[in-house]
Amino acid sequence: MAGSTGEGGGESPLLRMAPAWTGIAMRTLAATIGAYALASALAMALARTLPLSRAEATCLAAMVAVLAMPAAVIWAFAARTVTRTWGVMLPIIALGFLAAWLMGSPA
Amino acid sequence: MKEGFRQSMAWLHNWSGLLIGWLLFAIALTGTAAVFRPETSNWMRPEIAHHAGPVDQAQALGAAVSYLSSAGKGAPAWYLTAPDDRAAFTQAIFSLPRGGDANGYRTLALDPRTGRPDGIRDTLGGEFFYRFHFELKIPYPWGRILASAAAMVMLVALISGIITHRRIFADFFTLRPRKGQRSWLDVHNALGVLALPFHLMITFTGIMTLITLTMPWAIVANYGSDMARFYEDMAPGFSARPALGKAAPLGDVAAMVRDARRRMDGQISLVIINNPGDAAATVTISKHDDGQIAYAAGRVTYDGVSGRLLSAYAEDRPMRKLYDTFYGLHVGRFGAPVTRWLYFICGLALTATIGSGLVLWTVKRSRNGGLGYHLVEKLNIGVVTGLPVAAAAFLWANRLLPVTMAQRPEGEVRVFFTSWVLMILAGFILPRRIGWIAGLMLCAAAWLLLPPLSAWTTGRGMITSLLAGDWQFFGFDTVSLAIGLMFAIACRHMVRPAPAARVPRRMQAA
């Protein structure tokens, strides 16, 4: 929690800070569906590209993907604008799925 | 910019925490209780006599198998958990064409000496808290998905909480008691920071335990829909042979257990017997989790009829081992008993951090009021005091329901949920202050009176346990008293006049 000038100081700075409703909705969407899509894309791309055995690559890919999720959630609310939030997340999601698709399914 | 970041993180911390706070409180509380799952299971089966000295795992498994040869006939597999330093009985799970629970499974607690369930009361024991912790009593897979989602929100709340918290070290030494909002904030901060590494670890590893369900995309990418291949790759040495349809009696399981203990150098835990009674029977014995942090570190499989060793497996793939280490860190079965106490204390700290966070949310907004505020305030009473009451009621039901009652485990669970619902209703009906005081008082009474109730109904009171050197029963009763005492102190704190009423007195004196 913040000290005297932060939110402990009362409601007003928080209200001023709070994004407008559409902004909150867009960020929440990015923090839920967006973050999960990002983690899934990363999981698929890493699982197919990591230079490990099939079982080991699957294991590591899933663990890294899970770590990426909270990072994506924080980003969704930390980015200065909603455009920036999605502008960074969408290309990563697209690249991840593209990489997994290009690698094809395992033999 | 920096201030903006911190404030948006404060906003995220407050709202993500509130959104899922009650659920997290329940998950943290039952998870903390699940630390002592075997001990709770023992306490809830007082018919199993205390036995000094180490348990003979081979003899217990041998006895269990001879009982199951008739009682478990026709089951495709028997899943046995051996008694050990902590668990006093053999747990047997198997499915039969007739009977069993909703999924057709039957769970029995077998006496380690006779191998029989006779006279032992039917109960879920500590299993209830353990299951509720990640399944929330919601049908598969939704309960697990919801618990995982809650854990993810918790992780986000922790990270955003740390970012918000700018004086992390100074606040660690700060407690301003009886100052209303400030005090709640100090408690929330101190408990949150005190065991912060634990909070982060337990939340992160908790998410990890369910990733095959919640994050299956790495598996899909590498295995498609060939899940059999995936499981064989992930946990080699578990695969069963198809049944031959030719009857053959099981060999000497006790001898196999002795051999497995020698090979894996210590206690064993899970024993899976596939196709019992068939010529293709196999016996897979897993290494106990007490010797290493990693979960399920190794296993050996025997031919069920001849007892010949078929395979021995020790996990040594780095990534798989890393995952097992995360899993093992979460369930905390490794090491000496002091590990469990640390987990228990840190778990209580986490539960209290969530509880104080929920209260803080209302204390900060008490001047504004509003429907949302009242809803949160009322639910806080029903969850923060209601859940400990429900947990105690569950244990009371274990002692008070007739031992021979049909569907006894379900009866105990019904008492748990009925008490919780009643507590939530009471929270809504009673005025705020009365609601808190009555709730805390009930918590204190329910936990303080549990040991006398147990002594009266089982004859295994605290003094008897102490004299018999039965540290599990004595410890359980002591923890119950400690919890009751804690709530009694909290209640006394509530009853005493509010600080606002005391300030003028001091001002008069000045």
Image (spheres, rainbow, N blue to C red):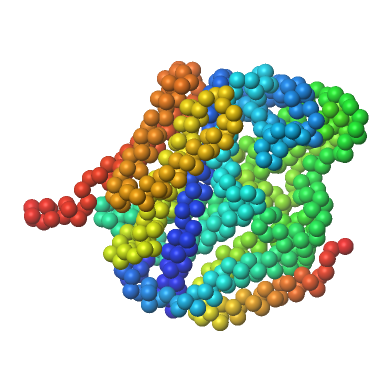
Task: Please report the residue visible at 52 percent of the width from the left and 74 percent of the height from the top.
Answer: A25
Give the farthest residue toward the left: B509
Task: Tell me, yes or no, if residue A34 can be seen here.
Answer: yes
Look at the picture and state if B41 lies above or below B144. Answer: above
Q: Position of residue A86 (x, y in %)?
A: 59, 78
Q: Position of residue B408 (x, y in %)?
A: 57, 31
Q: Determine the image quadrant of residue A5.
A: bottom left
Q: Is residue B336 visible?
A: no
For the residue pair A99 and B49, the one nearer the viewer reads as B49
Residue at image point 50% right, 53% down: B23
Q: Quadrant of the N terminus of chain B?
A: bottom left
Residue B11 percent coordinates (x, y): 43, 68
Q: Vertically, is B137 above or below B269?
A: below
On the rendered structure, is B266 left or right of B70?
left
Q: Residue visible at 40% across and 48% down?
A: B425
Q: Is residue B195 above or below residue B70?
A: below
Indicate left or right for B344 with B244 as reference. left
Q: Please tell me which residue lies in front, B306 or A20.
A: A20
Q: Is A54 situated left or right of B112 in this image? A: right
Residue B439 against residue A35 in the figure, above or below:
above
- Residue drawn at x 66%, y 29% as measured from the top left: B108
> How far across and down, in percent of the image, does residue B81 sit?
68, 32
How many numbered circles are shown? 0
Identify the image quadrant of the C terminus of chain B.
bottom left
